Image (spheres, rainbow, N blue to C red):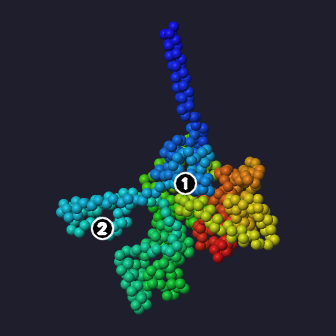
Amino acid sequence: MAFIKVEIEDMLIEEAFRVKHEDTEEQTEAPKSCPAKLRIILQEHDIRKLDLPQGIPGTVSELESIVRKTFGLNGNFTLHYKDADFGEEYFSLTTTSDIKDKDTIKVIHIVEPPTLTLTFTDVESSIKTASKTCIQTSVHTSVTDIFPSISGSFPGSQDTLILPSPEHKTQRSQRWPTEFSVPRFAYDTELVLAAGTEAFKKDGIQLSFTPILPDILEKLAESIFQYVAYPTSTQLSDVAEALVQKYPCLKEPGSYNGCYGWRQRLKYKMGNYRAKLRGLGCPELDVNSIKKKRAHDKAPAKNIKKPRKAEVNFLPPHPQGETEESLENERVELLNEVKRSMMNYQIISEKMAKTFSIRRQEIVSQATPINDLKYRWPALFDAAQINEEFTRITTVDLEETFMAKLDQYSPKIMSLVFSRGRSSKMSIQRIKNMLLEDYSLERRREAAIRCLVVFFRENEEDLFKEHSDDGDIANEVMKIIIARGSTISEPASARIVIEGTEVQQDLDVPRACALLMGLIYALNLSYPKELKNTFEAFQKIFLELDDMKACPKVMSLKNKLLY
């Protein structure tokens, strides 16, 4: 009996240990993670949503890896989060316990300074053995930029210093400069100009420039074409004035400003220069050749396709080594990438940049309808890609520049309009009521834009359409449709409609205006006639494109805003 009692006690102890062990395992088992969503700020104008079906990761490195893979980010970056204890200021994210569902995370890219490595062999040994000196650079730094005095060969040796050739650029990277820089002419031309300038300063003798005139005009034409193919009279005057300022001996005594004749010479030279490049197949000029025009447009000066809104890259050539067939294959790959459920935004951006030239030829030369463009180039209608396309065309940041200038001029614009009399009384009162209801940043920006329309005595209804439901958009040529919330606290939601097709949605009103400008440039559209002054103000005041030349009303407003 004692033996049976001991055995039963052992069984009870074992069972109690097993139950206790199971309870411990249940207590230590990790709770199941709940799905989460985060608001990711990639750039000021590129804000995305990140879905985390498994919940917020346990470590910051895991979260960084998910962000990098989801949005196709390259390079080093850190993540910042908003801290409620310090007035929603951003702090470095060191632990994921600081964030929760629907929090905002900002991606901060780390830009490392470029490093330069130079490796030289023994110069004396190099001369004796006639071996080449090797210069190695990293991060694509050009040696000639650092050592411009390095020549192609060493004295007393036939060896040539071979440097890596710079990447061939097919697109312009700069707008027309504030001060035109006169290029360096041929060596003999420079000698003649130096002697002529010295004689002019000493005795006031004008230089007889007939022998060197072809070289001067050719070099100036090349420099002008680096900025524009069709320079305006003002731009030609800038070049002529810069030329005679650098070389006073070239001034013309009979001219009212000393350089009128040079402007005329440059005008005809640019025509001849364009004709030469057109024969070489330059797409920006070949599109205007008579053989490329339609039957009813076969006249040299009829329906010329050229930049009219300060576009820097209006119709660029294809990248070096690319053909229409290869770029069409890139377009198909881009289309497949956009259709994927998990899009790689880095790949999309790279392919959009690579296919820029063929897309511009399709838009400018063929005037493809919006519906067809949306089918063939769906990525072009993404907000981030609208910004990038605008930068490729103009070299200007779209939303950043537009919003900065809008915020800068908003108080003055509203002050100018609110001080007006009876003619705009109803519109002014309606705008004031908007601000009384809601004085948020977006509402103040919208009020300033509406004041801009009122200032030019144009109709707000031609730009904005208040609508609470889908309605009929088929007849809308270019319109921003606004849906207001049921309460004041709910922000307005704006959509962009072009040629009866909705191209953007879920925007605030000021951002819709900025993106509409980007779409006008990206799709090569004209400004609506009834809103010509408003859109010209967007271009020349808010985006500062071709801002030195504007219609009288826009120039008048600009002067009032600046002084």
Of marks 2 and 1, which one's residue comes earlier in the chain?
A: 1
Q: Nearer the viewer, residue 193 or 430?
A: 430
Q: Nearer the viewer, residue 531 or 187?
A: 531
Residue at the image point whose x is 67% and y is 75% from the top: 560
Q: 479 above or below 66?
A: below
Q: Quadrant of residue 481?
A: bottom right
Judged left or right of residue 322, residue 155 is: left
Q: Which mark is residue 91?
A: 1
Q: Position of residue 259 (x, y in %)?
A: 51, 81
Q: Position of residue 394 (x, y in %)?
A: 55, 62
Residue at the image point whose x is 50% and y is 65% from the top: 174
Report the number of discs: 2
| Kind of residue at badge 2 | Ser
Callout 2: SS: loop
Q: Which residue is mark 2?
A: 151
Residue at the limit of the structure toward the left, as seen here: 128
Q: Quadrant of residue 435?
A: bottom right
Q: Position of residue 173 (x, y in %)?
A: 49, 63
The C terminus, quarter of image: bottom right
Q: Position of residue 114 (x, y in %)?
A: 40, 59
Query: Badges 2 and 1: C-beta atoms under 8 Å apart?
Result: no
Q: Which mark is residue 486?
A: none
Judged left or right of residue 73, residue 542 is: right
**Residue 291 visible somewhere in the drawing:** no
| Kind of residue at badge 1 | Phe
